[in-house]
Image (cartoon, rainbow, N blue to C red):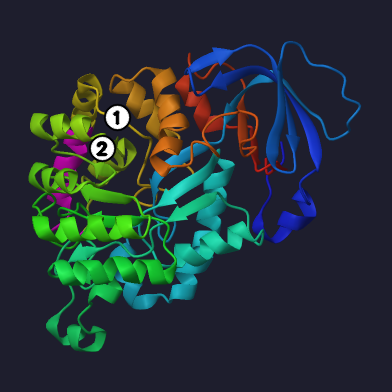
Amino acid sequence: MRACFPLLFLLLCGPAAAEQWISCGKLFDAKSAKLLGPHQILIREGRIAEMRSGQPMTTGNDQSLDLTDKTCLPGLIDMHVHLDHESNPNRYSEGFRLNQEDFAFRAVSYAERTLLAGFTSVRDLGGRITLSLRDSIDDGQLPGPRIIAAGKSIATTGGHADPINGVSRDMLHAFGYPGPEDGVIAGPIEARRAVRQRYKEGSDVIKITATGGVLSFAKSADNPQFMQDEIDAIVATARDYGYKVAAHAHGAEGMKRAVLAGVDSIEHGTYMNAEVMRLMKQRGTWYVPTLLAGDFVSEKSRQDGYYPDIVRPKAARVGAQIAKTFTQAYQAGVKIAFGTDAGVFPHGQNAREFELMVKAGMPADLALQSATRNAAELLGKWDELGSLEVGKQADLIAVSGDPLADITLLQRVEVVIKAGQRYK
C-alpha cells in the first residue's frame, strides 16, 4: 500500500484517473447498515458512475483496482475535529511562543493523517486557519479531507473559546479585549454581528460554546454561558445565511437553551439529562458524542503537568461521565452522528471512537452508519456523501476482514480514495 505525503503528493499520486473500476469483496451499505456481497464500482471524473453486484468482470482498464479480498466502505466522516492544533503538555504556552504560520504548517500534517486514517470528510469546529487549509485542499494543493469549517467559535465574554481566558491584566493591555469580530459576544446584537462576521470570513457552519469547557482556563466545564436571547439571535441569524449551528455543551441547562433555540447538534453532551434527550428527540437535534476525547482527557488528568491544575479536575469528571451519557442517549433513541474532537487527542486516531461506541453499547453496524449516512445527513450533504451510490462523490475506503465483527479494523484502513483519487 502507498501513502502520499505533502511534498511528494503530485509525484506519487498524480492526477485522478478519468475512469476506473473497483472490485470489492464485500460492501457496507450505509443506507441499510448491512454488509453486502461482491460489488464492482465504476468511478468516472471523481464520482460513482455505475455499480454492479456479483463477481468481478474483466474491464481491460489498467486503472482498475482489485479489492476482492477486502471490505469496501464509504469514506468516513468525522463531525467534530480541530485541525488547527493537537494536544501536548506545552499547548497552553504555545499561543505566546508560536506564530500562526507555525500552527498552519502543523495543520497540513494533521489533515494528511486524518485522510490516510480513512476520514475523507470532516467538520472542523473552531480555528481560523482551517478556512485557508480547506481552500488549499479543495484547490488540490494539499492532501487532506474535505473540510466543512466553522472558523472562529462564538463564545461569551470569559466563556469557553474566549481566547484571553487566563491572561494576566498586564497582558490584556497588549492583547486587547475581543469582540464579535473575534467571536466573543455579550448580548443579542453582538451575537448577530458574530454570525455575520463568520459569513464574511467564509465559514461553512456556525459553532457556539453553549457551556463551559473542559480544557479552557476556567473553573466550570458545564455552566450555561449564553442567555436564551443570545442563542436565539445566533440561530435566527444563522438561518438567514443558510448556516447549520453546532453547540458545544456539557451541562444540561446550556444544552436545553441551545436545543430550544433550534441548534442542529449538541457536541459532547456530557451531563445530558432525560429532559434534554426528550427535547432533542422532539426537535430532531443530533448528538455528537466525542467519546475518545473524554477518554483521552480522563487519562491525561492523572498525569502530573499535562494539564494546568484548574483543568485537571474537570477533565477527570467529564472523562468518567461521557461514555455513560452516550449509553443512555443511544438507548433513549437520540439521533447520533459520529464525532471525535480530534486535536484534543492526536490526529489520525479518529477511528478509535468506533471501539468506544461499541463498548458503550451501540452495535457496530449503527456505529458505522453514524460516520456515514448520519453524518452526511447532519451536514446536509446526503445527496453527495455518506454512501457508495451512483452519482455521489467517489469516497471509498477498504479494510481486510469484516468490520461488523471486529470494529477495530477501522483503525487499520488499507485503501483511501477521495473523489476518485487514490491516496493510500
Residue pictured at 50% horizontal, 54% vertical: 110
Crowding at label 1, few (<14), some or many (≥20) Cα neighbours within 10 Å? some
* Residue 248: % across, % down: 24, 50
Where residue 35 appears, as percent x and y from the top left, is: 54, 14
Q: Residue at x 51, y 33 (%)?
A: 386
Q: Position of residue 422 (x, y in %)?
A: 71, 41
Residue 382 in the image: above or below residue 313: above
Mark closest to the chain's N terminus, 1 or 2: 2
Task: Using the image as rendered, state which of residue 175 and residue 177 is in the foreground.
Answer: 177
In the image, the segment drawn in magenta is 308-322
Determine the secondary structure under disc 1.
loop
Instruction: Say if the magenta span includes residue 314.
Output: yes
Q: Amino acid at mark 2?
A: Thr
Q: Residue furthest right?
A: 60
Note whether 290 is above or below 168 in the view shown: above
User: Is 232 inside the magenta-drawn segment?
Assistant: no
